[in-house]
Image: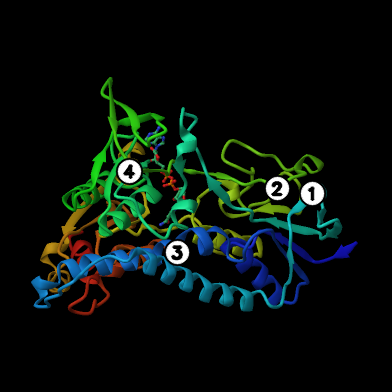
Amino acid sequence: MNKFDLIVIGAGPGGYETAAEAAASGLAVALIERGELGGTCLNRGCIPTKALCKSAEMALNVSEAAQFGVNVSGFSFNYAVAAARKDEVVKALQEGVKMAVSKCTVIQGEAKFVSGDTVEINGELYCAPRIILATGSQPAQLPIPGAEYAISSDKLLSLTELPPRVVIVGGGVIGMEFASILNAFGVEVTVIEYMKEILPPFDKDIAKRLRMSLSRRGINIITSAAVKEIRHDHTVVYDSKGKENEVAADMVVMAVGRRAVVPAGLENTMVEVGRRGIEVDENFMTAQPGIYAIGDVNGVMMLAHAASAQGKRVLGHDINLAVIPSAVFTTPECAMVGLTEEQCKDKGIDYKSVKVPFRGNGKALAMGEPDGLLKLIVDKATRQILGCHICGPHAADLIAEPAVVMSQNLTVDAICDTVHSHPTLTEVLAVAAGQF
Ligand code: NAD
């Protein structure tokens, strides 16, 4: 029997960061991984997608270069180079993860529970008083005829050339990020979304703004449409307003959510698995004392930074998990923190909301990216920020400022009383805050 103070199963951002921190504090930590260090985020998610986003942004910039006084001739795409660059970025970061977990005992293999404190890996037993499950999630598939003709985001990220026409099923975060990337590379893209608007958890004004922006770039976005069949030749059949329609494609990408990956042998423990994933309490402990579940596997919030933050909570940090920003890396980007305006209405909160377009901002105009909107929602009685929603350049970075104000329980006055440098995009938030 191999004994440790802590066993962490899964080396995605939740697992490896938690394992590294625990090992740095002096604990004997075993980190178990059946695939590659870095998990979905580094190998098949956030990082490779962001590398491709940069190539896409470069393609859009070059196509608009003449407006900036730069004439480019002979401009063409080489997706194989973009894909190879993405792989280089991933490889460099994999080295970083290896260094980060150097104080842990890293075990390559699949963990199977044999009891509430023991797992079997490659035929050997390992036990610890605390075990953290950070086994992540995998792409979900629609139960429709022909679902096997669609590829997942994992497969899409492994391509080295792109087809002329792609249909993306699902206008959520993954669907819209890939729509934005593929369109920039000259692919004819159609997105079919079941709900009335794309990005269902986002504020409707922001999602609409992104839909309009991407539609102007030539992406065909069909909402209120349920995909019911994918044919062998990649034709996608969907129902919309009671009518059956179809759209032809060379490739279909399924981006309809992700589902938890649960380790084997949980029946030998008291851990309970619900519809979203492993059931946990507010400190991410499962029904089996000593076993915790963080990140996508608990289904609470499928975001890399949420997984890492949950791991910090397990290690005893007093981290504010009520305020977690999220972002969509389209061009333009979208980001949000807190409640949407729809949620404020549903909760009957007495709020005031202010919208500020980016087109009045000097930096946005100078960058040639005036297409954007920031919405700030403030509680009338307490002046606390309830939510901030952005569609515009660098939205994913801009959202950090209102997130700090919210997580520290400050009021909107903290923004008004802070000098924002000029000319910067941060002035959009300062202008919004000044209207309360
Ligand atoms: P999602 O839940 O964000 O979106 C799935 C979409 O598919 C929804 O809009 C849903 O309405 C739609 N859909 C479902 N059934 C459909 C049907 N029959 N026809 C048409 N549309 C249908 O899921 P995702 O985009 O696959 O992302 C998975 C998870 O990964 C999410 O939790 C997401 O937050 C996370 N993620 C985050 C980032 C980021 O933070 N930038 C990036 C990628 C993924």
User: Residue at label 4?
Assistant: 344
| Label 2 element class | loop
User: Residue at label 3?
Assistant: 48
Q: Are marks 2 and 3 in contact (CB under 8 Å)?
A: no
Horizontal and vertical percent position of residue 181: 32, 58
Separation of marks 4 and 2 at Cα, in angstroms: 38 Å
User: Residue at label 1?
Assistant: 113
Residue type highlighted by circle 1: Phe
Mark 4: give few (<14), some (14-19) or many (20+) Cα within 10 Å.
some
Height in image: 229 above or below 326? above
Residue 204 appears left or right of 256: left
Q: Are marks 4 and 3 in contact (CB under 8 Å)?
A: no
Separation of marks 4 and 1 at Cα, in angstroms: 43 Å
| Label 3 element class | helix
Q: Earlier in the sequence, mark 2 or mark 3?
A: 3
Residue reaching furthest top? 242
Q: Earlier in the sequence, mark 4 or mark 3?
A: 3
Q: Earlier in the sequence, mark 4 or mark 1?
A: 1
Height in image: 383 above or below 194? below
